[in-house]
Image (cartoon, rainbow, N blue to C red):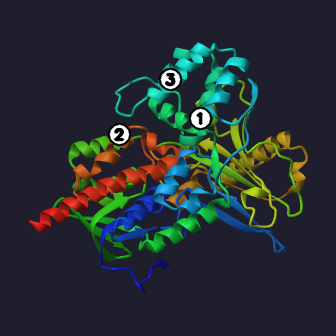
Amino acid sequence: MLYSSKEKISNSYDVIVVGAGLAGMTLANKMARDGRSVLLLESHNKLGGFATWFKRKIDSTNEEHIFDVSLHGFPVGMIKTCRKYWSREIAERIHQLKSVRYINPQFEVETDFTKEHFIKVLTDIFGVTLETVQAFFDELTNMNFYDNSKMTNRELFEKYFPGRNDITRFLLEPIVYANGSNLEDPAISYGIVFSNFMSKGVYIFQGGTDMMITMMRDELIKNGVDIQMQARVEKILVNDNKVNGVLVKGHTIHSKSVVSNSNLKATVHKMVGDEFFSPEFVKKADAVRLNTSSCQVYMGIRAGESIPYVGDLVFTSEDKIFSTDLILSPKVGSQTFSVYYPDTRPHLDPKYAVVSSSNARFEDWINLNEEDYQKQKQYVIERALAGLEKIIPGVRAKIDYVDAATPLTVQRYTLHEKGASFGTKFEGLDISMNIHKEIDGLFHAGSVGIIMSGWLGAANYGVIQAHEVDNYLSRLEKSAAK
């Protein structure tokens, strides 16, 4: 499938972007607006990467459900990013969620996820002194990527809230769902993301992910980006330590630069190949850890039925204490419900839907035989239904569609190695940002390190790398003019 003002794509571009996640799309849009010729290649039949959706018709009816994939919610900064690098119309559809709830054996809290309310909860409910709370937030605010701090999340929480597992749960659990952080990850990977989310609450795109990506697609085309769908890149072509294009279905498309929005390890080891990098770089890339994956359960409420307002995001758990290992457990001790009310898509007939999200490990799923896989999948579904029933009694009778996605589903549709929902751990950022120093014209923009903070992090990393690519192309032009 081709989206272009031409009948077919060109033979040569300034930049080819491999993968149409939000980082790749934002980079492509910015570079096209800056006058560069851009080709965006996507292996799937939709743009958006993890910012995606799907529709399911209900048997023997004309009704259908639309489900947004991935746990929703991003910082207020998404408004500024979309206004500056996309369009005012897209930015104006970003609205704040009203309520985020926690329900677990240690506490029940409802918050608007702003700094002011977090301070109130920590002092009034958890009994922490205002001085300690302010010192904690000051440390988060002053965290800088360029600092070489070795502090872990565990050490950060013990420094300010020693022995308070309940406070660790309150502060860290949402970020575990946002970027896969655990207690042993660098504190900066938590601090920067949490500071972003806390400033002015949590936001979503009103109109649904389908509308947002459609509006972005139209903006890309308007700005001259050629888009080819179902175009899986077999190889990024390198000659004399310099990128010269990609191979798609046996066809070579030339370019002065290539940006991979694919998984970092797949980019290095598969699409390019170890032989084109220095042994030291390959060794560092090998050492990069993939992040965890996820399961989701999609529950559609029958047309004509309604459910009460119970919050927009509900973090629930039956685990008596907080543990990132328990969050990853195949028995799904913890899950978060994203509740979609009719005002999520006000342009459609009133519909309700609920999506349960839980973190998961790929290795707990990949070796299951078909029978055990289906049993575990059914367990996750039943766990979601039972958990939702506790929040909304009687809701099970109103659900007419339910299905689940697993880490294997994530791998199938995103091509992420081991279904890594959040890309790589923190050390991946160094590899991603410096890959162009190994091969001229090769860049990466994807979920790595602190840039794995959901939609805003992806879009902003696309902008950062767009500047790098443009600087490279400008140097080529200056060299050619001499």
Classify 10 Å Cα crowding around label 1: few (below 14), some (14-19), many (20 and above). Answer: some
- Whether the residues at callouts 1 and 3 have beta carbons within 8 Å, the answer is no
Label tally: 3
The residues tagged by marks 3 and 2 sit, at their Cα atoms, a distance apart of 33 Å
Q: Position of residue 200 (x, y in %)?
A: 61, 38
Which residue lies under the disc numbered 1? 198
Q: Which residue type carries mark 2?
A: Ala
Q: Which residue type carries mark 3?
A: Asp
Q: Position of residue 218 (x, y in %)?
A: 53, 71
The residues tagged by marks 1 and 2 sit, at their Cα atoms, a distance apart of 32 Å
* Residue found farthest to the left: 482
Residue 202 appears in which quarter of the rendering?
Answer: top right
Which residue lies under the disc numbered 2? 287
Q: In terms of secondary structure, where does tag 2 sit?
A: helix
Q: In the rendered image, which quarter contains the C terminus?
A: bottom left
Q: Is residue 271 left or right of residue 77?
A: left
Which residue lies under the disc numbered 3? 138
The residues tagged by marks 1 and 3 sit, at their Cα atoms, a distance apart of 13 Å
Residue sitting at x 44%, y 27% = 142
Residue sitting at x 61%, y 57% = 92
Q: Where is residue 245 in the image (x, y as percent from the top left)?
A: 28, 69
Q: Where is residue 481 in the image (x, y as percent from the top left)?
A: 12, 67
User: Depth check: 421 or 98 in front?
Assistant: 98
